[in-house]
Amino acid sequence: MQLRTGQDDTLSAWLTVNSWHPPFLSGKVFVFLMTMFAQVQCPDFIPGDQLDRYLDRGWFRMGQTIFTTSFLNFKSQFYNAIWLRIPLDKFIPGTTQKKLFKRNSRFKIVIQKAEVTSEKEAIFSAYRQSVSFEASASVRTLLYGRSDKDIYNTQEVNLYDGDKLIAVGVFDVGKKSAAGISSFYDPSYKKFSLGKYLIYLKLEYCKKLGIEYFYPGYFVPGYPLFDYKLDVGGECLEFLESSTQTWKPISGFSAEGSPLHVMTTKLETLQQCLSDLGVVSKIMKYEFFDANLIPELEGIVLFDYPIFLSCNDLPEETPVVFDVRDNLFHWTRCKSVWASSTAGSHPDMYSTHVLKHDQDLFTTPSPSTLANIISDEIAVSRNFLRTKII
């Protein structure tokens, strides 16, 4: 995620002017600031049992930080991020895994503590050029970002064809959980399906260690790039339901019940109620919903709803959202913490300000109740203006 910036209003300039510094978070302290859709933390160290707890809550590694998010923005299209895990005690190798193990039996397998080498960087560079998606600039960038810390217990699966290293699969190990971070391979070996083979090798190794859960990250309904993860776990695969923060069988997943779909449907219902009362409104995407994922902004707790409803006759800093976690509409008041000097290119995308929630003006599960409250407020405001003019 990158904030839209102009020449004189960069985010770093804003941080400097406001003399804001991220809070110190000890690696020995495990803290969730509050329930947020997008959040990042920068601990000094993550012991195995704490990594287990992070993963169980839908958090994942990003360089030498750890983050969570419920939504993603790919080319101005918003999607749900649905976190996945595989209960290893229920995992049974399927036909695909058995075929891959037989087909690739000639390759030597070495599992060890992860390290960055020039040989791996060369393979990653070739792999990066061969894929259609945007990968990290290097293995070092992938694992460390801009940090020199090493807060994870990171292992790697190395595959050799004779003495030649041909593929690497990286994963983090906690006390009872493990997370698959990345896999990459020499593109000339693409026909061997080494990416999927490496995932299966990680699963097999972790199961032998007595690890209970393996977390492959998220999949994105409507965005096929991540669908391969749905095949790996088989019938035992589980997803984290955002509204209840509980893990459920993937067989129970429905795109219609996903957070973004529910939010959109609820706001459209409210919009119709407002229209019936003569109130004009529009549903906007919020470009900076994932600003909380910027490590330098850790702890500010910014407004992080991906969509909201805005009424034409009300100030733009009073958006209405629907929260799937409490099943309530929230008519809010926000304040700007940073302003962009460049106009957005999409008419349905709000990109004028980075917002911070100030207070709830009204909450209710009923769209008609809220529509009436808003309509009355607009009427009062109009009468006040008429009185001032007279």
Image (cartoon, rainbow, N blue to C red):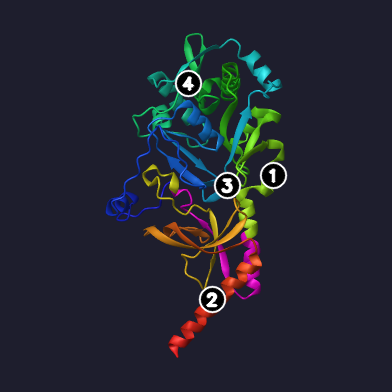
- Circles 3 and 4 in contact, beta carbons < 8 Å: no
- Circles 3 and 2 in contact, beta carbons < 8 Å: no
Is 180 located above or below residue 162 in the figure? below
Disc marking residue 378: 2
Disc marking residue 155: 4
Q: Residue at x 56, y 12 (%)?
A: 107
Q: Secondary structure at mark 4?
A: strand
Going from N to C along the chain, the mark reached first, 1 or 3, is: 3
Q: CA distance from mark 2 to mark 4?
A: 59 Å
Residue 187 seen in the current view: yes
Residue underneath mark 3: 79
Going from N to C along the chain, the mark reached first, 3 or 2, is: 3
Q: CA distance from mark 4 to mark 1?
A: 34 Å
Residue underneath mark 1: 254
Q: Which residues are magenta?
A: 267-291
Residue 130 seen in the current view: no
Give the position of the N terminus as an image quadrant.
top left
Disc marking residue 187: none
Q: Secondary structure at mark 1?
A: loop
In front: mark 2 or mark 1? 2
Q: Residue furthest front?
A: 29
- The amino acid beneath tag 4 is Gln
Give the position of the C terminus as an image quadrant.
bottom left
Q: Residue at x 42, y 47 (%)?
A: 2
Going from N to C along the chain, the mark reached first, 3 or 4, is: 3
* Magenta stretch holds residue 30: no
**Residue 30: x percent and y percent?**
45, 36
